[in-house]
Amino acid sequence: MYRSKIVPKFSFKTCHMHRKNFLTSLLGIPAIAATGLTTITPGAKAAGIKGAAPAPPTKKLKTSLNAFSFNDPLLAGKMTISDMLDFCAEAGFEGVDITGYYFTGYPNVPADDYLYGIKRKAFRLGIGISGTGVRNDFTIADPTRRTEEVQLVKNWIEVAAKLGAPVLRIFAGNQKNEGISTTILYKPPTRSSTSSERSTPNGWV
């Protein structure tokens, strides 16, 4: 008697209905997840499933504009980096990638005031600086010129750090070097600085 008061009498009919209601309720789950609504479908209600607010969708990707999109106006001086940042904010971009040759004075390292001014404006607009890059060539056969290319990359690593950019894009190179001795090609460039000389932290606004 005690058992019959707690557990309903089992029958294949009731088991079948419960399963049917359950499967029917599942049909409404994708729609609820897609729309963010908390409305319960009739099938879910019949199956006794209580509604709960769905978790907000997780955004895993952010959009970032590469400055090359405005290559011509930037190089022609018809647009500034500041103008481009304004465009990014208006268009809803969350990041911007500013290649080095769009900075005034490239390939020379820009002044800190200039760099921090760009970083500060991007921050105030809610835009992250997702990267920068240089136009280098590590396949130049002449050891002296190749050393200069290495130094260029090192210099712009510092620029990237000051901007807060997590990425610096570089090239391998495209020289053919036909008829040049492999002894010259594979000779490592002269070290231009030590790690201790480049350990000063950057990135302050």
Image (spheres, rainbow, N blue to C red):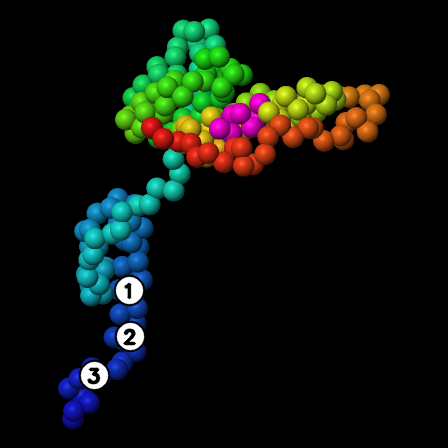
Which of pointers 2 and 1 indicates the residue nearer the eye?
Answer: 1
Residue at the spot of label 3:
7
Q: Quadrant of residue 111?
A: top left
Read off the magenta span.
152-158
Q: Nearer the viewer, residue 18 or 160?
A: 160
Residue flagged by tag 2: what amino acid is it? Cys
Residue named by callout 1: 22
> Label 2, on which residue?
15
For the stretch drawn in magenta, what is the main secondary structure? helix
Sequence-first disc among 3 and 2: 3
| Dot 3 amino acid type | Val
Q: Residue at x 28, y 75 (%)?
A: 15
What whole-number distance in Å separates the C-alpha atoms at marks 3 and 2? Answer: 13 Å
In terms of sequence position, does the residue under pointer 1 or pointer 3 come before the other? 3
Q: CA distance from mark 1 to mark 3?
A: 20 Å
Residue 140 location (% of width, % of height): 71, 21
Instruction: Give 142 or 22, whichever is nearer the viewer.
Output: 142
Residue 172 drawn above or below residue 86: below
Residue drawn at 45 percent across, 13 percent down: 104
